[in-house]
Amino acid sequence: MKIKTAEFVISNTNYRICPAPKMAEYAFIGRSNVGKSSLINAIVNQKNLAKTSGKPGKTQLINHFIINKEWYLVDLPGFGYAKISKTKRAEFHDMISEYLLNRTNLMCLFVLIDSRHKPQDIDKEFMQWLSEQRIPFVMVFTKTDKLGKVVLAKNIGTYKTEMLKVWEELPQIFITSAEKKTGTKEICDFIEQLNPQFKEII
Ligand code: GTP
Ligand code: MG
């Protein structure tokens, strides 16, 4: 799929005031600093549509972008960021879980995982929760330009082995680099193939 237009729509703290759920939607989530906003920019081919930062905790709202005037991409705040207050963390948690549980047009959630790290409990537990809640998701390994081919293959292999200890089947996996634009075409094609399955829930 070709991305012809990508525009910012609105930022919210509450799913209830997000744009009306009349078009297919795809959201990006994962630990703070994993590269969610950067990957959205790489996909839409713009440098600063989603705000990025070298410091974790940059994205703090539910940010809607409309693509080709046909579907939404959503940039969510990261989780697992240590340097925020307990109150703020609880607020983020509620905001994100309410969005995920109630957003009727959410076709698929992209769960981003830093390809450089060993499987982290916070990510594994989050994916477990998604499956319990029947929220459809795929896994996206990020920042693969920072690793050589051999280490990358080893890390992904380790992740798969770890997941297969508890999962019967693995979710779909995308290998990406926002820096090199690796995997962006695959993500666009995946979305293109899912879009026709969208049905508005009234
Ligand atoms: P929060 O909004 O804070 O949760 O972070 P985020 O997940 O949106 O991460 P963001 O896109 O802001 O990127 C964090 C840092 O990682 C920035 O310094 C990016 O330049 C860098 N980064 C993101 N993706 C890549 C990548 O594919 N390759 C490399 N080398 N750096 C990346
Ligand atoms: Mg961000």
Image (tube, grey):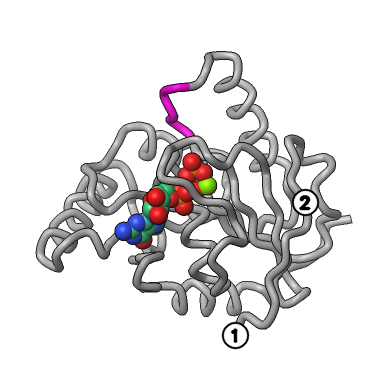
At x 67% / y 55%, what residue is drawn?
Answer: 106
At x 75% / y 41%, what residue is drawn?
Answer: 12
Instruction: Give the Cα distance between marks 2 and 1.
Output: 23 Å
Left or right: 136 as drawn, with respect to 158: right
Q: Main secondary structure of the magenta part?
A: loop
Left or right: 107 as drawn, with respect to 31: right
Q: Earlier in the sequence, mark 2 or mark 1?
A: 1
Give amino acid for label 1.
Lys
| Range covered by the magenta-colored residues | 79-83
Q: Which residue sits furthest bottom? A: 2
Foreground: 152 or 157?
Answer: 152
Tag of residue 2: 1
At x 64% / y 55%, what residue is drawn?
Answer: 74
| Above-or-below relation of 2 to 94 | below
Tag of residue 10: 2
Residue at disc 1, secondary structure: loop
| Quarter where residue 166 is shown | top left
- Residue 89, given in percent of the width and then of the height, sits at 55, 22
Foreground: 79 or 137?
Answer: 79
| Above-or-below relation of 176 to 59 | below
Give amino acid for label 2.
Ile
| Above-or-below relation of 29 to 169 | above
- Residue 1, given in percent of the width and then of the height, sits at 58, 84
Q: Is residue 55 magenta?
A: no
- Residue 132, given in percent of the width and then of the height, sits at 52, 39
